Amino acid sequence: MAVLITVAFAGGLYFGSTRSEAIGFTVFDSANSTQPEHVDFKAFWKAWNLIQERYVPATTTDPITDEDLVYGAIKGLTDALGDPYTVFLPPQEAEVFSEDIRGNFEGVGMEIGIRDDSLVVVAPLKGTPAERAGIRSGDKILEISGESTDGMTVDAAVQRIRGERGTTVELVIQREGERELLTITIIRAVINIPTIETSVEEGVFVIRLFNFSAISSGLFRQALREFVQSGGKTLILDLRGNPGGFLEASVDMASWFLPTGAVVVSEDFGGDKEPRFHRSKGYDIFTDQLKMVILVDRGSASASEILAGALREHDVAILIGESTFGKGSVQELLDVTSNTALKITIARWLTPKGNSISDGGLIPDIVVPVTSDDIAAGHDPQLERALEYLKK
C-alpha cells in the first residue's frame, strides 16, 4: 500500500508532507458508518429539527440545503479536534484533491502549512510563479485577495490561492525581519514541478532533490550512479525547499546508504498500539570513505525530514543549514461518500532514535542562516559552509 507524505501548496495539494501538507497518506475505502451506542445524539437531532422548523436566512443568499448542514456538521467534528491536518473534504475540495493526485492543476506553486496557529509558507517550489514573485520559506500569509486567513485551514487556503492560469492572487505577507507587511501579487500558471538536478561544485558532487515523487527514486539512483562514476568521495544532498512526497521514495533513497533492516522511520500510533517500522532495503553501496552533507532549511518537510533524520542518526551525514519545518504527522484518506473524503491524523513520524519530527523539526549540526542580503546578492552561505566542511 502506497504511503504518501503530503503537503498542501497553493496550486493544489501536492504529494510532498505535510502537501505533507508532510504527512503520511494512505488511501482507504469508506469507514464503518455504524452509530456508536455510547453517544447520545438527541441534542444534535433537536438542533437539526429546530433549524429546519425555525431558521430564516438573514440575507438573500442561496438557501442552505440539508446536504450543506450535513457537511457543516462533519466539518464541526474535525474542527473540534484542533488538528489542522485533519479535515473534511466536501465535493469541490475532494475533486481538487483528486486532480492534484493526477498532477493536473494550476496555481502558484508554494507549499503551505500551519505553524503556531498561523498559515505559513513551507517553501515556494523551484521555477514556479511563487518563487519568481519573491515568496520565501517562513512567510506568514495574513490575507488572500483581501480575505483574512485567521482560523483558515490549509485546505481552505489552497482553495482560495489556486485558480486558472493567467489570473492573479494577492497575498499580504508578514516576513521575519521586515517591519512592514508585504503585498505580493502572483500570476497563476500551470505548475510543473522539477525533481532532481546534479552538479559538481569545487570538486564536490551535489544532488539537488526538489520532491519525493513517484519517479524520484529512479532519478536518485541515476544521480548516485553518476556520482560513483565520477570517482568522488564527497557528496552534498540538497533538500532545501523540498516539501516531501512518497514515503517509499525516502525509504528507498535511505537504503543506498544503510544496511538491511536499519530503521529509517517509525510510525507512533499512540496508546498501547504497536509502532510500525519502515526499514532499509539494504542497497548500502557506500563505504566509510564517503563524506556527506545534507543541506536543509525551513522549507525541508516530511519526507525530507525523514531522510535527513535517518542518515544523520545512522552517522552517514551531517546536517547544515536551518531548522526544518517539523511536519511529522501521518494521515489517512477515507471516503465518506462517493464524492467526499476525510483526511485524519492517525500517527506521528519518529526518527530511528525515537525523536518526533514534529517537535521543532530537525536542528542542523551546523546552523547557517541566510539573510535577505544573501538572497539579493545571489550568495549561498549554506552551500559554501558545506563545501568548506567537506574539503577539510
Image (cartoon, rainbow, N blue to C red):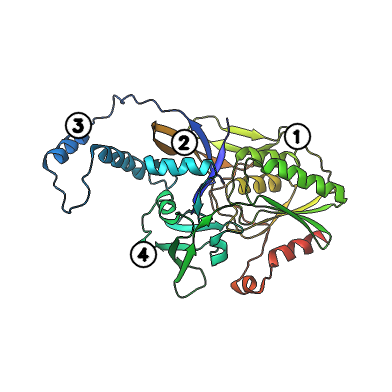
Precedes in sequence: disc 2 or disc 1: 1
Residue in front for this viewpoint, 14 or 354: 14
Precedes in sequence: disc 1 or disc 4: 4
Q: Which residue is mark 1?
A: 282
Q: Nearer the viewer, mark 1 or mark 4?
A: 4
Q: Nearer the viewer, mark 2 or mark 1?
A: 2
Q: Secondary structure at mark 2?
A: strand
Q: Which residue is mark 4?
A: 146
Q: Gap in Å between the C-alphas at discs 1 and 4?
A: 52 Å
Residue 20 visible in image: no
> Whole-percent x and y of residue 178?
50, 73
Give amino acid for label 1: Gly
Q: Gap in Å between the C-alphas at discs 3 and 2?
A: 29 Å
Q: Secondary structure at mark 1?
A: loop
Q: Which residue is mark 3?
A: 42
Q: Is residue 205 left or right of residue 295?
A: right
Q: Which residue is mark 2?
A: 333
Q: Secondary structure at mark 3?
A: helix
As drawn, the label of residue 232 is none
Q: Gap in Å between the C-alphas at discs 4 and 3?
A: 40 Å
Is mark 1 in CB contact (under 8 Å) with mark 3? no
Q: Secondary structure at mark 4?
A: loop
Residue 271 visible in image: yes
> Whole-percent x and y of residue 200?
80, 58
Q: Residue at x 14, y 44 (%)?
A: 55
Question: Split into 4 quadrants, where in the image is the N terminus?
Answer: top right
